[in-house]
Image (cartoon, helix red, strand yellow):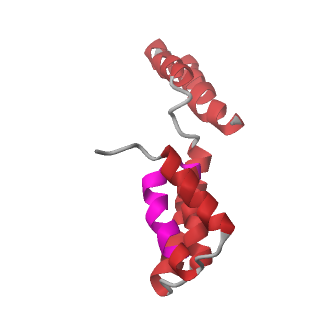
């Protein structure tokens, strides 16, 4: 969370002060109000690198249940349960008795938006 405040609140404030453009402070207000929905840029970069690595592992070995599980955990952390569900289902095909996989799949289905 500290990097969120540094990136979305402190940096625009300093830009506004040093560039003499107070309109940049609107970014600070928007970032403060929308902080629940705005990503932490450091977490975004960390997740992006991890996702690329795990997707490469899954592409090389589609039966890699561990990589699929870790990829699903990243998608759940990013609040993207729709992307996690297929990974968990394929991992469960490989290890149908895994309590962890069943729990993660249930969690992903619980928080996934309901479609008609």
Q: Please state, as top left, top right, bottom left or bottom right, where the C terminus lies in the image.
A: top left
Horizontal and vertical percent for residue 80?
Answer: 47, 50
From the viewer's side, name the closer residue of 68 and 27: 68
Which residue is at 60% across, 24% downward?
14
Horizontal and vertical percent for residue 43?
Answer: 61, 49
Instruction: Give the residues drawn in magenta, as a range.
Output: 77-91
From the viewer's side, name the closer residue of 96 and 79: 96
Which residue is at 45% across, 81% downward?
59
Tell me which secondary structure the magenta stretch mostly adopts.
Answer: helix
Which residue is at 71% across, 35% downward?
2
Considering only vertical position in the picture, is 82 above or below 86?
Answer: above
Relative side of 73 to 86, left or right: right
Does the magenta run of residues contain 85?
yes
Horizontal and vertical percent for residue 45?
Answer: 56, 54
Residue 79 visible to the viewer:
no
Relative side of 98 to 114, left or right: right
Q: Please state, as top left, top right, bottom left or bottom right, where the N terminus lies in the image.
A: top right
Q: Please, which residue is most extreme toward the right here?
A: 2
Does the magenta run of residues contain 82?
yes
Horizontal and vertical percent for residue 29?
Answer: 52, 17
Which residue is at 55% across, 29% downward?
36
Residue 71 visible to the viewer:
yes
From the viewer's side, name the closer residue of 11 and 2: 2
């Amino acid at each position: 969370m500290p990097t969120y405040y540094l990136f979305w609140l402190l940096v625009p404030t300093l830009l506004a002060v040093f560039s003499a453009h107070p309109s940049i402070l609107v970014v600070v207000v928007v970032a403060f109000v929308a902080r629940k929905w705005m990503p932490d840029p450091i977490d975004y970069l960390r997740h992006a690198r991890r996702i690329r690595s795990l997707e490469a592992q899954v592409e090389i070995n589609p039966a890699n249940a561990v990589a699929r599980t870790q990829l699903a955990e990243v998608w759940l952390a990013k609040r993207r349960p729709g992307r996690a569900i297929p990974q968990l289902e394929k991992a469960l095909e490989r290890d149908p008795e895994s309590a962890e996989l069943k729990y993660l799949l249930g969690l992903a289905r619980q928080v996934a938006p309901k479609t008609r």
